[in-house]
Image: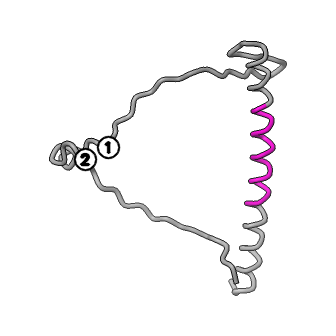
Amino acid sequence: MSIYEMNTQAEAYFSLLAQIEELQAEAEAIRDSFKAQMVERSTEELEGTGWRATWHNVTSSRLDSRKLKADMPELYAQYSKASTTCRFTLNAISA
């Protein structure tokens, strides 16, 4: 593949990312309108033809690894495990 073709593909890629961002913002606005309706109606669930919206509190517990590492470094080292991944990035740069 020539540099020209790669430049063209990169341009298309960034254009698609911009479209995705716009669509995500539009989808978020719709989600927010549902949330506003739920607050207005004092409900945690709305349902229509082919869809259901729920909005409620969820409690979860997570391990605070920074605190564990600071307070008990030996225990942290004993139970931590390293992993290796391959990261690809394609970023726009200013000329």
Rounded to the nearest angstrom, the CA distance separating label 1 from label 2 is 6 Å
- Quick check: 78 above or below 1? above
In the foreground, 55 or 7: 55
In the foreground, 12 or 74: 74
In the foreground, 26 or 20: 26
Q: How many marks?
A: 2
Q: How far across and how far down the image is residue 45, in percent?
A: 71, 16
Q: Amino acid at mark 2?
A: Lys
In this view, the residue farthest toward the top is 42
Q: Give the SS element for disc 1.
A: helix
Q: Residue at position x 84%, y 19% from top?
A: 49
Q: Quadrant of residue 60?
A: top left
Q: Which span of residues is magenta-colored? A: 17-32
Q: Residue at position x 71%, y 13% from top?
A: 43
Q: How far across and how far down the image is residue 95, in percent?
A: 70, 84
Q: How far across and how far down the image is residue 6, in percent?
A: 70, 79
Q: Residue at position x 74%, y 74% from top?
A: 9
Q: How far across and how far down the image is residue 41, in percent?
A: 78, 13
Q: Amino acid at mark 1?
A: Ser
Q: Residue at position x 21%, y 43% from top?
A: 71
Q: Which residue is mark 1?
A: 65
